Amino acid sequence: MPRKPRRTSQDLLIGRRLRDRRKFLKQSLQELSAQVGVSYQQIQKYESGQDRIPASILFLLSKALDTSPNYFFTRTLEDEIRELFPDITKEALAEAMAFLYWFQRIEDDTLQDHMRKMIMHMSGDPAPK
């Protein structure tokens, strides 16, 4: 019997995007599984990246979640942050996103530069090259 392929970062990304979209729409595993025609345990395996999602099921998932199949392959800023800081909590991530929102609203470039330098100094990290 052939071995199951190992999980890849793409499998994990697709699973995380699936879970995020399902939760955003406030659908339970049971509701989504009924719409797609697979068990809720199988949806859990897809979400964890344990099992790869066949193209036909991915198409059904995208319809059930009212999104494009491309949605599952698109990395978000949150994905990038979680890759850089795997132990970040949801609370810290929310605070960081709020900080970015406020920071980008500062229209004065000089003030933004001063803020960057102040934060780098406070963190003890040297300026990036």
Image (cartoon, rainbow, N blue to C red):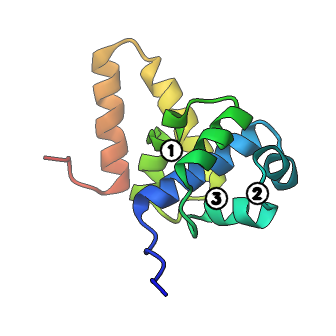
Q: Is residue 39 above or below residue 24?
A: below
Q: Nearer the viewer, residue 20 or 36?
A: 36
Mark 1 or mark 2, whichever is nearer to me: 2
How far separated are the C-alphas under marks 3 and 2?
Answer: 13 Å
Q: Residues within 10 Å of mark 1 (few under 14, many from 20)?
A: few
13 displayed left or right of 51: left
Residue 38: mark:
2
Q: Secondary structure at mark 1?
A: helix
The amino acid sitting under disc 2 is Val
Looking at the image, the residue that sits furthest to the left is 129
Q: Residue at x 45, y 26 (%)?
A: 103
- Which is more N-terminal, label 2 or label 3? 2
Q: Are marks 3 and 2 in contact (CB under 8 Å)?
A: no
| Pointer 3 residue | 47
Looking at the image, the residue that sits furthest to the bottom is 1
Residue 85 appears in view? yes
Q: Residue at x 56, y 56 (%)?
A: 53
User: Which quadrant of the structure image shows residue 63?
Assistant: top right
Q: Nearer the viewer, residue 111 or 61?
A: 61
118 displayed left or right of 66: left
Q: Nearer the viewer, residue 49 or 113?
A: 49
How far separated are the C-alphas under marks 3 and 1?
Answer: 17 Å
Q: Residues within 10 Å of mark 3 (few under 14, many from 20)?
A: many
Q: Is residue 19 above or below residue 60?
A: below
How far separated are the C-alphas under marks 1 and 2?
Answer: 28 Å
Q: Position of residue 14 (x, y in %)?
A: 53, 51
| Pointer 1 residue | 78
User: Which quadrant of the structure image shows residue 45?
Assistant: bottom right
